[in-house]
């Protein structure tokens, strides 16, 4: 059967592109419907719908702001400052009427730079420094100066040049104090830079606060680096020797004080002993004087014997010029002189016994 013959409700084969099986519209029909709808939007009612939809989307998307944690939002109306909002969700007039700019106030910012400069003695040094700062006033940070971070960088360089330029090169390189006012601590230099930088920022009223200033490296020119390294090493050795001397001093001084106390105590004891001995001698002399006045001959004889005993107590021989009627016994190896049995008849020459304690032989009578 031909495709164009009547019967069975069949039509030309291109009808299948318009309607598929089951009477559903085809691709061409769907395109025509879409074009018709677009044409209807071109009328007054369609344009109004588009405008309203755009307005609603604009209001929904620009009438709020979300500020993150650790930030504050600076709200501007037609570019002029209006208010500051904290972290969280906030409503505002839609943009561009009102805009909100987030500023991190709790975050510590940092900048590093390097300056090559002259010291007080016209020596060249290179200073690597680091500055940490924080935003304290978002309004001033945004509107007082055009570039607050760049301003801080320039102010930091000026502060470093002012402080380091007033110091001698040796003082800056060693960075230590030995009690001389012209040789300050490196920490003192950093504190001076921080104070001067903060004063400059306060003058600019830029809403920044300096939290820390540190020198990463201070180096001399490469041509003189070796010489300055030797100077620094020598000063470190000097400091080590001074510390060692102080340690020895702290140890020797107590020892010397203890020795001095001991000598003073011995001197006091010797003084007390001499005084007591002198007083005893005086008392003894007074007693002897009293006895001498009572019996001069006996006292004189006794004093003479005692004196001779003191003189000859270490001698091991006795010379007797008497008639030998008495015997004087001399002790053994110690040479002690024992009292004679009959003092008036002393007249014997006696020799001491040996180390075993033997008796002395009697001397021959003349």
Image (cartoon, grey):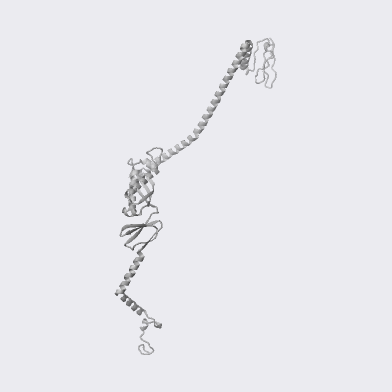
Say whether residue 195 is visible. Answer: yes
| Position of residue 14 measured from the top left corner of the image (x, y, whole percent) | 35, 83
Q: 18 or 197, which is in the foreground?
A: 197
Say whether residue 73 is visible. Answer: no
Above or below for 362 versus 159: above
Q: Say which residue appears at 56% left-offset and 23% top-offset.
A: 272
Q: 175 or 327, which is in the foreground?
A: 175
Q: Is residue 214 left or right of residue 254?
A: left
How many discs mark residues in the rendered view? 0
Q: Say which residue appears at 48% left-offset and 35% top-offset.
A: 250
Q: 209 or 64, which is in the foreground?
A: 64
Q: 224 or 239, which is in the foreground?
A: 239
| Position of residue 41 measured from the top left corner of the image (x, y, whole percent) | 31, 74
| Position of residue 220 measured from the top left corner of the image (x, y, whole percent) | 36, 44
Q: Say which residue appears at 33% left-offset and 68% top-offset.
A: 55
Above or below for 219 versus 92: above
Name the quarter where the N terminus is drawn. bottom left
Quadrant in the picture for residue 171: top left
Name the quarter where the C terminus is drawn. top right
| Position of residue 273 measured from the top left corner of the image (x, y, whole percent) | 57, 23
Q: Is residue 314 left or right of residue 117?
A: right
Quadrant in the picture for residue 295: top right
């Amino acid at each position: 059967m031909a495709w164009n013959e009547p019967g069975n409700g069949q039509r030309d084969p291109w009808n299948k592109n318009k309607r598929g099986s089951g009477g559903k519209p085809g691709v061409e029909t769907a395109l025509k419907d879409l074009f018709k709808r677009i044409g209807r939007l071109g009328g007054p009612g369609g344009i109004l719908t588009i405008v309203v939809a755009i307005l609603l989307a604009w209001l929904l998307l620009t009438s709020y702001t979300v500020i993150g944690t650790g930030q504050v939002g600076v709200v501007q109306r037609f570019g002029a400052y209006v208010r500051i909002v904290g972290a969280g969700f906030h409503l505002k007039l839609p943009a561009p009427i009102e805009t909100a700019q987030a500023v991190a106030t709790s975050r510590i910012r940092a900048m590093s730079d390097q300056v090559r400069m002259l010291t007080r003695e016209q020596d060249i040094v290179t200073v690597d420094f680091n500055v940490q700062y924080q935003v304290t006033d978002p309004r001033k940070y945004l509107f007082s100066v055009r570039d607050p971070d760049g301003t801080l960088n320039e102010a930091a360089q000026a502060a470093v040049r002012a402080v380091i330029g007033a110091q001698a090169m040796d003082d800056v390189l060693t960075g230590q104090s030995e009690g001389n006012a012209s040789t300050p601590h490196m920490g003192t230099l950093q504190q001076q830079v921080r104070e001067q930088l903060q004063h400059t920022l306060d003058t600019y009223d830029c809403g920044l606060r300096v939290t820390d200033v540190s020198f990463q490296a201070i180096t001399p020119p490469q041509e003189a680096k070796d010489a300055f390294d030797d100077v620094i090493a020598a000063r470190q050795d000097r400091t080590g020797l001074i510390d060692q001397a102080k340690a020895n001093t702290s140890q020797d001084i107590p020892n010397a004080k203890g020795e001095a106390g001991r000598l003073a105590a011995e001197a006091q004891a010797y003084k007390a002993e001499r005084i007591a001995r002198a007083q005893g001698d005086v008392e003894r002399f007074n007693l002897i004087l009293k006895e001498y006045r009572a019996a001069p001959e006996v006292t004189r004889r006794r004093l003479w014997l005692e004196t001779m005993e003191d003189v000859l107590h270490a001698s091991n021989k006795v010379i007797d010029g008497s008639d030998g009627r008495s015997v004087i016994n001399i002790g053994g190896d110690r040479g002690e002189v024992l009292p004679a049995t009959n003092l008036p008849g002393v007249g014997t020459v006696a020799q001491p016994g040996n180390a075993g304690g033997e008796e002395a032989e009697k001397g021959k009578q003349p």
